Image (cartoon, coloured by chain):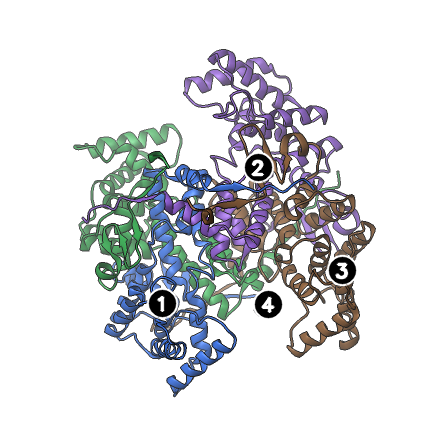
Chain colours: A blue, B green, C purple, D brown
């Protein structure tokens, strides 16, 4: 087989008597010594995190685990109800909802930030960049991703908390700073409260730790995997799928077309 | 709507200004204060864990994250390659492999243990139970789930490590004990090394923390969600899907049927 | 690479200028000449079907396409709503519900029939087999899969229709016959109407065409793929996901645990 | 519940004794009387098709069923191997690859056509539209979706076949015409063969039947559902997953990072 056809990975290697993860011996050096949040950084950043980054990662993994009976929990429960032989299928159904609208929307905020301020940029005038971003989005009549909230006009307490943890843990860097300046500029420009929302705060803090913008929704997907399993486990003990069906049926109206 | 049709959940509640998770205020009481492994216990056990259980949970979440280019990583990479617009789809493809054969097989070991020793049992003669389990499986000519390993005749170092952590963290209880007695009894009965494998160790330690047997593969699914994202992220930087296709093609033989 | 490592397939071969499907040239011999139901038989049975089998297959593929706003349609719509960038994800969410309880339950009926009457059996006394099946399930206190219906005590008109088509199309064979005798025997034994239901009729007619019992839910999965796409397409034109959320919320009760 | 919260569907209605599909009684009017391709049109177009449209739909559903051991078949086989308890999971893994790059790419071609020639346009100068499309894509340095092929410089025989069937069946309309004019214009402009490929032909013929551009990959997803089931069924009889693993391993190189 020629060299071009080689399949190269730098993540891990399973040998007969040991497993290497980014150069560390899993059993000897990692198990029992690191937390899952440290493992998350090792896998996604290629390095073990600082204590501050570890605390930040724990917050990012925790924040989107549970939000009541949202769409992904409903999908997990309904799928489990009809396919109880395979809870991985019900978990997958929940994960599939982590798209561009709700769970995965931090991606768009992170992309905006990295496009406005590429990682390799040395010196940057954050106020000027913020002003230019706000202008560009206003011209295109686009909503600023990660900013503003339908129901939390006064600010999303979860976003504030993430920024607080970011500051306490020395993670707060220029992407957090830039996003807050964008929000501030937009507020002045549009004359109304436009606070950073939880989506934006996840994006900015993840970027400041070095997470690529394309995978800032990693934390949400891991968190929702846990959330989905918890809903499936509750559904096992206390089945609600039929009641969900009944609630939907009670609001259902058929508007069948005439035959054509 | 009648009372029967109510949809009841005890996991969480999203209010306008706060989110409750099993009675805790997410922003005020959990974020920045607990680790993701503690959140995992809160969701799956309904209570915050001890320090020992937290360390155990971190080990359980970490142990199956990365194992080289296994099936689930291949599925994630191939799916990402043809559907890069939706990394949640590639993650879901990886999760779907967490079935009864590889990733999810701790379920069968856990089921065996709970059926042999129901949780409500007060006093139990573990040696007698172990003997009866080994006899029953031998009669049915069934392999003991969680015991023995094709390639690790001398014992899987990951299993030993999990038991070590379980002892150090006071998690080691009667399910760990029972599984090791079953392995010991089977070794004597069959006259060859039959150590507990990693699947069995995950099952027994999870049971000793109080995880229901039906969801002992939770840790593997959460870990593999992280692993899949890491492989997708590497695939973004260094695409290997075409090389995977080429490697498969190089071994491919068509044995087309005659037309019928 | 050694012979053992060869990957063998008899399904199809993509060459530079032609694609072979089970020995047929796709462009020259199949496209424009066969229906999708004939292609279904070619893929699953390894041969082109008779005219009768084609009609039967069309009925099997059509029967489970649409059933109102069932779980799989709800999962598809909710997933599309939060992840509109990838309709394949919403379709996958719908497919994942094709499990052992609802959509995929024909599998259990088919398994019962093949275990009672293996394909290689030459001569068989169907009445004796039916009696023995009914006895065995009664002893184990198991429900006969594919027989009886919660809401259609008088018989499911869809099952009757499938048997009618099977007879008209010469597909009706000993598996259909056996299942109807099992139902008849059970009715006499238990003294109440126990008609074959749609699940059972799908299983029996598929078996009589030669479909392996393990994949008798193929027809349901293909049909539901179409059904899911139709629901997603309607959701694009007339979004209902928020209303589904609202209907669920209106029935929701939180019973948060006390803190522990 | 207020009127806004009503959930409206025009697709189907499951009553106690009958199922209505777009106004037709499933058992009385559809089963045994229509083909699955006619059902596909009824669901996606809201009307029963002409004989020509039926033949076209059968070709569109058939054309992408089988293409050898492509990514989606590999994903299905690997997933089945580790999770044999749930073939719907393996089918879902295959479907998840129907994304923007391979299987689902007809979407982009269809979008280009509808944006250039909105459905409501009465009279249109197709040559002028084609010229403007080619110019716009050249200016943006974008590849024309649905045109050109890496390996079929002389034209993809499957595309030619679809257009032939479209002509014979009176489906060929202005979207087919426009796409072929775009290809012709691009060939002259760029001085090399740029034939319509199979993706483009699917998009154009589907549009000419009235399929919304957003769901032109419906045919591919339905076809691949069948293809995936056939691969899973072959995998059951003749397991190849370990050989696929071995082929990948034989090309694998670990380039572990230094510890950091």
Q: Nearer the viewer, mark 3 or mark 1?
A: 1
User: Which comes before the other along the chain, label 1 or label 4?
Assistant: 4
Please check whether the numbered discs 4 and 3 fall on a single chain.
no
Compared across the picture, whether D22 is left or right of A80 comes to: right
Image quadrant in which the N terminus of chain B is located:
top left
Residue of label 2: C215
Image quadrant in which the C terminus of chain B is located:
top right
Which residue lies most toward the front here? Answer: D3
Badge 4 crowding class, 10 Å Cα cut-off, few under 14, some 14 to 19, many 20 or more, is: few
Q: CA distance from mark 4 to mark 3?
A: 42 Å
Compared across the picture, whether D129 is left or right of A146 comes to: right
SS state under label 2: helix
Q: Nearer the viewer, mark 1 or mark 4?
A: 1
SS state under label 4: loop
Q: Residue at coordinates 35% horizontally, 52% vertically from top-left?
A: A227
Q: CA distance from mark 4 to mark 2?
A: 40 Å
Q: CA distance from mark 3 to mark 1?
A: 46 Å
Q: Which mark is residue A2?
A: 4
Residue of label 1: A197
Q: Name above or below for residue D210 compared with residue A13.
A: above
Judge whether residue B238 can be spotted in this image: yes
């Amino acid at each position: 087989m020629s060299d071009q056809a080689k399949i190269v990975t730098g993540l891990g290697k399973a040998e007969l008597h040991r497993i290497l993860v980014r150069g560390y011996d899993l059993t000897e050096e990692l198990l029992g010594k690191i937390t899952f949040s440290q493992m998350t950084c090792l896998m996604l950043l290629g390095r073990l995190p600082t204590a501050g980054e570890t605390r930040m990662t724990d917050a990012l993994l925790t924040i989107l685990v549970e939000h009541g009976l949202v769409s992904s929990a409903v999908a997990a429960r309904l799928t489990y109800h009809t396919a109880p032989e395979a809870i991985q299928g019900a978990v997958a159904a929940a994960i599939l909802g982590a798209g561009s609208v709700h769970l995965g929307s931090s991606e768009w905020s992170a992309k905006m930030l990295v496009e406005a301020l590429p990682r390799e940029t040395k010196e940057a005038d954050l106020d000027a960049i913020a002003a230019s971003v706000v202008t560009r989005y206003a011209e295109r009549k686009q909503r600023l991703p990660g900013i503003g909230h339908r129901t939390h006009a006064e600010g999303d307490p979860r976003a504030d908390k993430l920024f607080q943890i970011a500051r306490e843990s020395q993670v707060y860097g220029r992407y957090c700073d830039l996003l807050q300046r964008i929000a501030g500029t937009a507020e002045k420009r549009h004359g109304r409260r436009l606070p950073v929302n939880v989506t934006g705060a996840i994006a900015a803090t993840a970027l400041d730790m070095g997470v690529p913008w394309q995978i800032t929704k990693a934390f949400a997907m891991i968190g929702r995997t846990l959330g989905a399993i918890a809903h499936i486990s509750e559904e096992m003990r206390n089945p609600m799928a039929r009641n969900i069906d009944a609630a939907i049926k009670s609001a259902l109206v058929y508007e069948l077309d005439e035959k054509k």
